[in-house]
Amino acid sequence: MASLTTIRDGKRPTKAIDFVDNSDGRKRKRIRLGPCNNKFAQHCKAWVERLIAAKATNHPDLQAIEWANGLADDLHGRIVKQGLLSPRAPQTIAPSLSDFLSKHIEQREPELAPSSIERLHDTQRVLEAFFDPQTSLDAIAADMAHDWRASLRSQSSEATTRLHCRNAKAMVRAAVKRGLIVANPFAELASAAIAADHDRYVSPQESCAVLNECPNLQWRLLFVLCRFAGLRCPSETHSLTWGDINWECKRITVHDKKRKRLRVIPIFPEVATYLEQAFDIATEGDERVITLSKYNRHRTLHAIVARAGIEPWEDLFQALRQAAETDLAKRFPQHVVSRWIGHSMKVSERHYLQLTDDFYSAAAETSADSAAVASRNGLKATETNAIAPAEAEAIIVANAEENQHLREKTQARPRGLEPPTTGSTVRYSNQLSYGPKLLFHNGY
């Protein structure tokens, strides 16, 4: 199909592959290999013949294409020129880490909540603190990604580390989909969400103490909305309007900005009093239920909790939301509570529901009561059914004699030469020659 030709038109002879392209009007074509040894020329000739056959049968030869992809650009281009291969796609230059992340986050802003965008920016800062911001995206290897995670874990909790790994994995995955890089170096990092290791249940007693230290009605209302209604702060608390309050049905429409939907919750008794007081003092034209600033809320709540004589806990507002769901789950079915709180039952179980002390107390009291009842019943049965030692010995002897009688009655029959019949309580052979002996043994 093809032949090797030596061209002597210069100081060094070069080799070429000549062939006839039957699919192109039987034209004679030539692929110059340049100066090379005979072994390489024969190797190229064999692969080119496979490409010629693939073109003639219109059936791609994947192995031949893979071989051609490994060639230098100039030789690959000569094969393409003769119509045996498709041109190579222009090579994409990977952007720098900083440029790509900034562009990606900017393009996600219309579809993500502001809090989610803020977390992506946090991950960008963490990445750029470890890698040079001008590092090319394709220069980050998987080993470097694991080093980044180890460095991050030494400074943050496992839950925070996994959050950043999850964000980094998702953002760089977009670069793979766009064809900017071949593989995602963060793909193998452990990033599944886990419950934080500093969960803190805020009891009703502590909640009352904090409420007493709140400086005004607005702060008391904000606190009960988070602690007893489970609203997210500030995305849900500060977007709540008086038009969202249905006084007649005793319901609140919550704007769930995280999931971009609305959900309806009851006006819980713990919230109703403060909500009514805020409504009574609201002036005409006021729309927002919570008029406090979104900023410095953690610092203020931290000071309020400290004034109440309570050690401030981590994730101040998130802990209030967790405590709200934990209390509601004791009174209502979990699928109802999860709908009110605004996430799935799986998320509730993994990140929100807490094991509180009152569960242990209730279980201990129930166990103690059961033990006391069992002890009293056992004592009563002992007193009622008590028997004398002599009578007990007589019962034991009578039982032994009855057992001996049963053993003699069910004594095995004599066996013949044949093996006993399986599964029969009378273990003897059913051979006819033993009939007279059996009749005699049974008294006939």
Image (cartoon, rainbow, N blue to C red):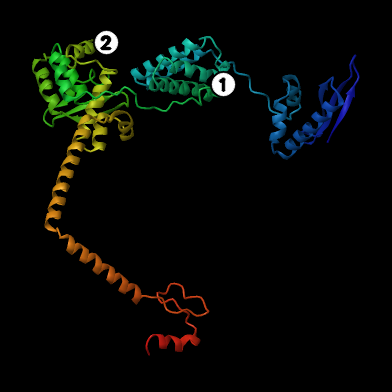
Indicate the position of residue 145 as horizontal and vertical percent values.
Answer: 52, 19
Q: Nearer the viewer, residue 303 or 335?
A: 303
Q: Amino acid at mark 1?
A: Ile
Contact flag, marks 2 and 1 (Cβ < 8 Å): no
Q: Which picture quadrant has residue 30?
A: top right
**Dividing the picture into quarters, in which one does residue 395 lie?**
bottom left
Of residues 415 and 276, the one drawn nearer to the viewer in this rendering: 415
Instruction: Residue at the far front: name it.
Output: 390
Viewer-nearest of labels 2 and 1?
2
Q: Which residue is mark 1?
A: 181
Residue 254 position (above or below residue 234): below
**Which element is circle 1 on?**
loop
- Position of residue 433 measured from the top left corner of the image (x, y, whole percent): 50, 87
The secondary structure type at the circle numbered 2 is loop
Q: Which mark is residue 358?
A: none
Describe residue 185's horizontal placement relative to residue 17 as left or right.
left
The residue under label 2 is 295
The C terminus - image quarter: bottom left
